[in-house]
Image (spheres, rainbow, N blue to C red):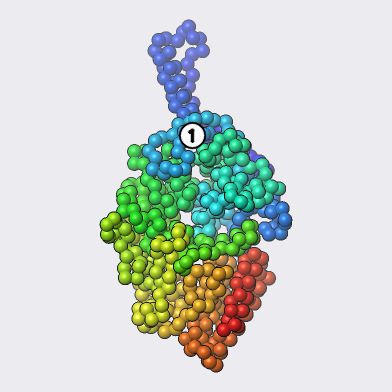
Amino acid sequence: MSEVSANKRRARSDGAPPADAQRISHWAMRWLTAIGFAVQAMVAAAVVPTPVVTGPIPGDVPGTSAAHNWPFFATHIVMSDYGYVEQEFFFEGTATRYSSPTGGAPNNTTTAVVASTGHPYKTRLLVRRPTDPAKFNGIAIVEWVNVTNGYDVEIHWQESMAYYIRQGYAFIGVSVQNAGVSGQGSPLRGLKAWSPTRYSTLNVNDSGAVGGDLLSYDIFSQAGQAVRNVSSVLGGLPVQRVIAKGESQSAQRLHIYFNAIHHLDPVFDGAMITHNAGTIRSDITTPPIIRLYSENEFRNSPNIQPDTSTLRTWTVAGSTHSEYYTMIARAPILLRDHGLQAFDTCATPARSRVPFFMVINAATDHLVKWIRTGAQPPSAPPPQYAGTPLSLARDAYGNGLGSIRLAEMEVPVARNAAVTCGLGGNHEMFDTATLNALYPNHGSYVSKVAHATNAAMGAGFLLPADAEITKDKAAGSIYGRGLDCGYLCIDEDAFPIHPSSSLLRDQTAALHFVGNEALVDTLEEVTRQIATGYTQGSGAKAEKSFAKAIEGLQHYIAQVQERLAAGHLVMETSTLLIDQTNTLIQELEAL
């Protein structure tokens, strides 16, 4: 189906002077001249049109056709289990090219002007929304998807999918850059190369006539208009507010967008910008904006822009630019759609385990309240710096000081920092002696985690549901039990380069399917058995513990198969988890 809406979001009329020019007075002529200037100003501002929307686009079940005729990066979640549906739409029209920075200057302070108009484009919206209006909270999240890898990645969906579903949001991923549509590098991984059958007609650069993704800003605005004005996009759900989100390279472009373009004809009610250290102009009216920085963005940059009545910037201690939980949450669809494994190759163990996504969830909650009621979010504690030149101050374990501090930093079991391994940073577990000295008994460890978690929740940086997840993980852990975790137990790196029960446990938790709590419990017991075996060393007792761990993993496989048979798992998730489990079993059998 297709739906066409009016070219302008709001009607604008300036009246009309008398038709007979001979009867127009000198003052009337001056009035007409003023009207002409007003019209020119409106053209310069380029009123954002509502595009033509087609869809939902039909297709095959993901993973079932050689032509890839399904939405790229379609979610691995069984959406119907949560009262949600996933649909893809195409939208098209003509876009405006602005005289604005092309992506390398997020601190620009110049308002853009129209350079040219009428550039044809066609691209896609990937929509996840409640099916029941009673579940919808009225908020649509529109993400400028990230294309750094040469293909579309909806980072904010991967980070916060459980939160969005829990709270009843609609989520819309928008493809606005040519790298994601046409691909880059070798092999090409953009939409058109991935599925010519489905995406061959997409075009975000006027068929190559406009470079530098200069149409992306207006295309993104028009995506917001489609969400607001074209009822089919959200299945008739009543949209109250529309929020823009972007991460890293997309966040850089959102800095440009809100500094130079958005205020000309506002579309979004608020924004969240993550993992990009730009500046938001203070001399223009912007909607409420919350920015979140990992250590990569602030470790050597003490000049963080102060908070204002429309801006908050939160820094999260120990977090890193490329988050571990985001990586493992997209592992099944990355394998399904590109045949790629989700892991890092680094000299030291990579990817901080500080759950940056939980702070994003809390910030989103604050942003919605800010937009709806004017209640401003808390300001974050500043990072602590030391030395010449200034850099992030660190404790004896190498963990950063100051900023928002979750339990992973307040009650540490590892060094989590943006020091090595590029944007992924490092996650280096403390040795057994250090862990035993810090946490001589399990109850003490769990109590400290609960205290730190309650403090973060009380300060407004953690939501109750995420606080419970943190406490439950601590309760199920082996910390404070005097055990030596060992290689096949320890939480470092990722599958497939490092088989580990702790890693399989986190992978299972991150993939969000009905009944996964029981599988997490199984893996926590497996971890205790593996750690017990390592602690016992060689001999019959150790062999017995490892054998119990193998039995537990075989039971886990049966649980995965049950979830698949019941329709609560998709095949790609089941395959990934069973393959990882079999690898771990083989490694245990070889001990």
Residue displayed at 29% across by 59% down: 385
Residue sitting at the far front:
347
| Quarter of the view holding residue 282 | top left
- Quadrant holding the C terminus: bottom right
Q: Position of residue 378 (x, y in %)?
A: 34, 56
Q: Position of residue 297 (x, y in %)?
A: 39, 54
From this view, report whether residue 295 is shown above or below residue 183. below
| Count of numbered badges drawn on the protein | 1
> Is residue 162 left or right of 62 when viewed as pictured?
left
Q: Amino acid at mark 1?
A: Tyr
From this view, report whether residue 354 is shown above or below residue 484. above
Q: Position of residue 588 (x, y in %)?
A: 58, 81
Q: Let me know if residue 166 appears in the view.
A: no
> Is residue 380 left or right of 28 when viewed as pictured?
left
- Quadrant holding the N terminus: top right
Q: Position of residue 304 (x, y in %)?
A: 33, 51
Residue displayed at 46% across by 24% down: 40
| Quarter of the view holding residue 431 | bottom left
Frontmost residue, 169 versus 551: 551
Circle 1 Cα neighbour tier, 10 Å, few/some/many (<14 / 14–19 / ≥20): many
**Kind of element beneath mark 1:** strand
| Quarter of the view holding residue 587 | bottom right
Q: Let me know if residue 277 appears in the view.
A: yes
Residue displayed at 45% across by 62% down: 421
Residue sitting at the far bottom:
540
Residue sitting at the far top:
22
The residue to which callout 1 is attached is 98
From this view, report whether residue 560 is shown above or below residue 244. below
